[in-house]
Structures are given as structure tokens and as C-alpha cells.
Image: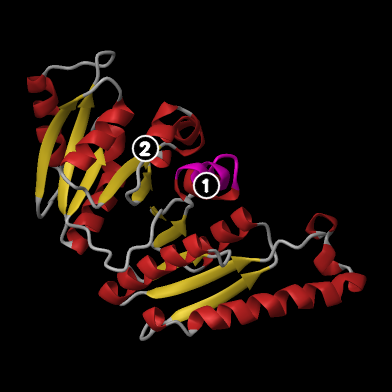
């Protein structure tokens, strides 16, 4: 894990994400790219290119530079290589471009809890990042000064299309020394027998080298309730989910699964794109 991208709007929640990113960086000797997208009031009319707007541009840029310098002086970033990036671009476009140009391995973003998560993610730039990102996105919802992953839940149907992103799940779990809890949620509407579920999961995991894992079948009235209740029952430190790009993420964020997992979970969530 060479590079971690952390978008910041200088809110407390963005700093929560930066603190977690710093802990991950120290454990993996990673570089942090601290990014702020400067979306100017008149950006829609190409403010940057118009000479009459240059003083305004410089005012905003200098204010951002000062805030970034203040962040760079925080003790929790000591000993970490941190690169500051200010880009005059819409947030989503800039984050995606920087991720590709700098070969980023992980994006770490903050959210504002249940109500704030809706405000930040649904129909927002952040939703677009998660939907389109080819690399894992870690969502941090609360301050955590001791970010450790002992129990990592990954809920799935363990179909063949999950195999590609699942290797990233395994790599992430192994890197953090986490116990990976693989769970199938059995619901009345999508019921399969325990034997069928066990055989399917056993066949699936045989393709991977997982240092420490268990498989589980959890019965609940809905997938979202099952993931949340199971995660709470084992005191999970992280919930992982795979996403299906634009089509899948529309369901992921706007359907019941989105509200149940993303809005109601207080635990960190990481997504891996199929």
C-alpha cells in the first residue's frame, strides 16, 4: 500500500479520516496525498481562466494553503510523507484523476453519521467517487485514535463475479492481521439451505489463501438487518462490501441496503468494486 488519498474539506469528519489514514500509513510505510478541490463560486463560468477573477482565485488558494499547513503540523502526521494537492476542479473529477495519475491504492473519506451521511453521500461527489472508484474506498464515521482491525466482516452471495474484488479483500485482511468473517445472509425471500450455502462458500474460499477466517450463515428478515446484527454480534471493527459500478451503486446507496448499512452502521465501511 504505497499511496493513500484523503480528500479534505477541513471538517472534523475529514480529519477523522486523515487520522485513520495516518495510522494505516505508519503501519504500511505509505505516503498520504492530502487533497482539497477548490470549487470556486464562479467555477461554472470558467473563473480560473478569466483575468478579472484572478484576485479571488488567489484569495481562496492562499486560505486553503494556510489550512493545509496547519494540518501538516499535527503530531499524528509526524514521520509520514504527506503531499499537499490543491486542484481547481470539481471534487469528483479531481479525486478520480488524482487517484489514477498517482496510482493510489486506497481512498479514505470521512462522513457525518446517519443524517450527515445522507447529506454527504446521496447524490453527492462522494457517492460518485465510491460508485466509480476502481480502488477500495474506506469510509470513516467516527474518530478513532486506535484504528485496529481484529474482526473484519465481508457479506456477499459469493458468486463468481465477486472473485476479482475478493482478492483485494483478502489482501486487506491479511495486511492488517484481521480475522475475516465471511457471511451469507439468508432471508425468507432469498432462502437457500444451510448445506447449499456452506458448500458454495467452501468452494469459493478454496481459490484464495486467507490467513485467518471463518464462514457464517446468518438468518434475518432482510440483508441489511442481517449484516448489521451479525457485525454487532461479533464486535466487528470493519464491514466490507462489493459494489457493481453505476448500476449496483444506485441500488447500494438508494435502496434499503444503503440506508441500513451506510446510514445505520457506526463502524467503518470499505467498498471494493467488482
Residue at point 84%, 68% (across, down): 49
Q: Secondary structure at mark 1?
A: helix
Cα distance in 3D space between marks 2 and 1 = 14 Å
The x and y percentages for residue 269 are 35, 48
Badge 2: how crowded within 10 Å, few (<14), some, or many (20+)? many
Q: Is residue 14 above or below residue 168?
A: below
Left/right placement of residue 85 relative to residue 171 reads right
Badge 1: how crowded within 10 Å, few (<14), some, or many (20+)? few
Residue at point 60%, 67% (across, down): 36
Left/right placement of residue 57 relative to residue 9 reads right
Left/right placement of residue 260 relative to residue 180 reads right
Q: Is residue 96 above or below residue 67?
A: above
| Dot placed on the residue nearer the N-terminal end, 2 or 1 | 1
The x and y percentages for residue 77 are 40, 80
Q: Secondary structure at mark 2?
A: helix
Q: Main secondary structure of the magenta part?
A: helix
Residue located beneath label 2 in the image: 261
The x and y percentages for residue 123 are 60, 40
In magenta segment, residue 121: yes
Occupied quadrant, residue 89: bottom right
Residue 58 appears in the rendering: yes
Which residue range is magenta in the image? 114-124
Left/right placement of residue 13 relative to residue 91 reads left
Residue located beneath label 1 in the image: 116
Occupied quadrant, residue 184: top left
Amino acid at each position: 500500500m504505497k499511496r493513500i488519498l484523503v480528500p479534505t474539506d477541513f471538517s472534523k469528519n475529514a480529519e477523522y479520516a486523515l487520522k485513520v489514514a495516518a495510522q494505516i500509513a505508519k503501519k504500511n510505510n505509505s505516503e498520504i496525498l492530502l487533497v482539497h478541490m477548490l470549487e470556486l463560486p464562479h467555477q461554472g463560468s470558467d473563473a480560473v481562466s478569466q483575468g478579472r477573477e484572478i484576485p479571488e482565485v488567489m484569495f481562496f488558494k492562499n486560505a486553503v494553503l494556510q489550512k493545509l499547513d496547519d494540518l501538516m503540523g499535527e503530531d499524528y502526521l509526524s514521520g509520514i510523507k504527506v503531499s499537499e494537492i490543491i486542484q481547481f476542479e470539481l471534487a469528483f473529477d479531481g479525486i478520480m484523476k488524482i487517484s489514477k495519475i498517482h496510482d493510489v491504492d486506497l481512498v479514505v473519506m470521512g462522513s457525518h453519521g446517519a443524517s450527515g451521511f445522507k447529506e454527504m453521500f446521496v447524490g453527492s461527489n462522494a457517492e460518485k467517487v465510491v460508485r466509480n472508484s476502481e480502488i477500495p474506498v474506506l469510509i470513516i464515521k467516527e474518530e478513532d485514535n486506535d484504528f485496529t482491525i481484529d474482526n473484519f466482516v465481508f457479506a456477499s452471495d459469493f458468486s463468481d463475479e465477486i472473485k476479482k474484488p475478493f482478492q483485494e479483500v483478502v489482501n486487506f485482511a491479511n495486511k492488517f492481521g484481521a480475522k475475516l468473517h465471511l457471511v451469507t445472509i439468508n432471508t425468507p425471500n432469498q432462502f437457500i439451505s444451510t448445506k447449499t450455502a456452506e458448500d458454495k462458500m467452501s468452494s469459493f474460499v478454496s481459490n484464495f489463501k486467507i490467513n485467518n477466517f471463518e464462514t457464517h450463515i446468518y438468518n434475518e428478515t432482510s440483508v441489511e438487518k442481517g449484516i448489521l446484527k451479525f457485525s454487532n454480534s461479533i464486535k466487528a471493527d470493519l464491514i466490507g462490501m462489493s459494489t457493481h459500478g453505476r448500476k449496483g451503486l444506485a441500488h447500494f446507496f438508494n435502496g434499503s441496503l444503503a440506508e441500513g448499512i451506510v446510514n445505520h452502521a457506526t463502524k467503518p465501511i470499505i467498498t471494493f468494486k467488482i
